[in-house]
Image (cartoon, rainbow, N blue to C red):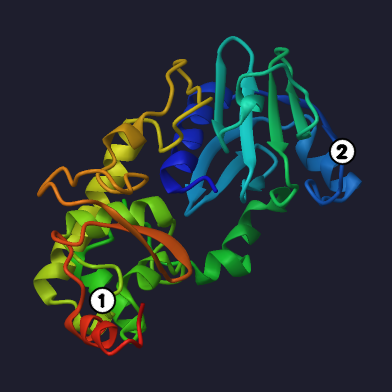
């Protein structure tokens, strides 16, 4: 699934490319991907101009001159590909990002007055584009539940500690993956942030020291900023607005490095399961919590 840095990369690319463009037509292949009333599309989408492209967590928002907004969720396999005076594509990494379009995965096509097009591709049809009045967007259930943006200046250490305290009895990894605690953190960035903060993912929130939470807050911001600077975590078939490919995973310290030497201590990176997710950890830099080790010795945890 595209994570926050990938969605932010999409936002930045589209912001440079489609602001001010007029939408002249829309086609789609299934109502599941484009669940909108035809009258709303005719009145508020066709003929409108793009006035802004923003993001909330992993959701993209394209504001229109009609005071309506296209709310876009890429879900697991969604992509947005722009073809016009420049080429831009980001999202789930498969050949549709760089191949001829439309193709079998194309669900929605927005055509602009200058002849350029924006393709929404989605192999598994879990993603969607909804057209809503802009004033109603904050009232979507997701928007009301989602936690603070980790890259916002308002996301201070104090705010982080207050939010994370809500999940004191869960593992620290489960807590930072919880979108109601913190917006947009996915599996890759949870692993990388916990490694940088030297916290084992199985540690219960209540057992994480205050100084470790300070370090984790800093690590989350640093890891996300690095990934965005490198174009997201996609490591193949990614093209941004300047034609560059995403390269963050070449800098990853633990993710997808199972069996390789830790870049800090030289120990072998391990892959375990935490919060139902494959989790990458250095057993030396991120020592297991004492209570987990004791249970392992007793045979209750394998």
Task: Answer whether residue 150 is visible to the viewer in this image.
Answer: no
SS at mark 2 in the image: loop
Residue 102 figure quarter: top right
Q: On the rendered structure, is 291 left or right of 300?
A: left
Q: Which residue is mark 1?
A: 203
Residue at 23% of width from left, 68% of height from top?
200
Q: Residue at x 28, y 52 (%)?
A: 192
| Quarter containing the C terminus | bottom left
Outermost residue toward the right in this view: 38
Numbered disc 1: secondary structure: loop
Q: Earlier in the sequence, mark 2 or mark 1?
A: 2
Quickly name the residue at label 2.
29
For the point 56% across and 12% down, the residue is 86
Picture coordinates of residue 234 (x, y %)? 46, 35
Disc 2 to disc 1, C-alpha distance: 46 Å
Left-right relation of 205 to 182: left
In the image, residue 200 sits, relative to residue 292, either above or below, namely above
Residue 231's place in the image compared with 178, above or below, is: above
Toward the top, the furthest residue is 85
In percent of width and height, residue 214 lies at 14, 65
């Amino acid at each position: 699934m595209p994570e926050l840095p990938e969605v932010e990369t999409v936002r930045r690319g589209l912001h440079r490319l489609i602001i001010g463009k007029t939408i002249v037509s829309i086609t789609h292949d299934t109502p599941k991907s484009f669940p909108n009333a035809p009258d709303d599309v005719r009145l508020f989408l066709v003929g409108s101009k793009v006035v802004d492209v923003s993001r909330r967590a992993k959701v993209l928002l394209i504001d229109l001159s009609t005071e309506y907004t296209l709310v876009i969720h890429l879900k697991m396999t969604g992509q947005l590909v722009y073809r016009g005076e420049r080429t831009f594509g980001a999202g789930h990494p498969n050949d549709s990002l760089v191949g001829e379009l439309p193709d079998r995965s194309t669900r929605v096509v927005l055509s602009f007055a200058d002849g350029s097009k924006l393709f929404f591709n989605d192999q598994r049809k879990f993603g969607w584009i909804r057209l809503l009045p802009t004033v109603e967007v904050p009232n979507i259930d997701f928007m009301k539940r989602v936690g603070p943006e980790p890259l916002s200046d308002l996301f201070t250490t104090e705010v982080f500690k207050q939010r994370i305290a809500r999940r004191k009895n869960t593992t620290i990894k489960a807590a930072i993956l919880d979108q109601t605690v913190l917006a947009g953190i996915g599996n890759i960035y949870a692993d990388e942030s916990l490694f940088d903060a030297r916290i084992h993912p199985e540690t219960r929130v209540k057992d994480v020291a205050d100084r470790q939470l300070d370090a984790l807050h800093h690590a989350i911001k640093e890891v996300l900023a690095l990934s965005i600077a490198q174009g997201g975590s996609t490591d193949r078939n990614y093209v941004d607005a300047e034609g560059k490919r995403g390269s963050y995973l070449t800098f990853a310290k633990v993710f997808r490095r199972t069996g390789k030497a830790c870049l800090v201590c030289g120990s072998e990176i391990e892959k375990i399961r935490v919060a139902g997710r494959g989790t990458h950890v250095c057993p030396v830099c991120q020592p297991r919590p004492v209570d987990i080790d004791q249970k392992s010795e007793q045979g209750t945890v394998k």
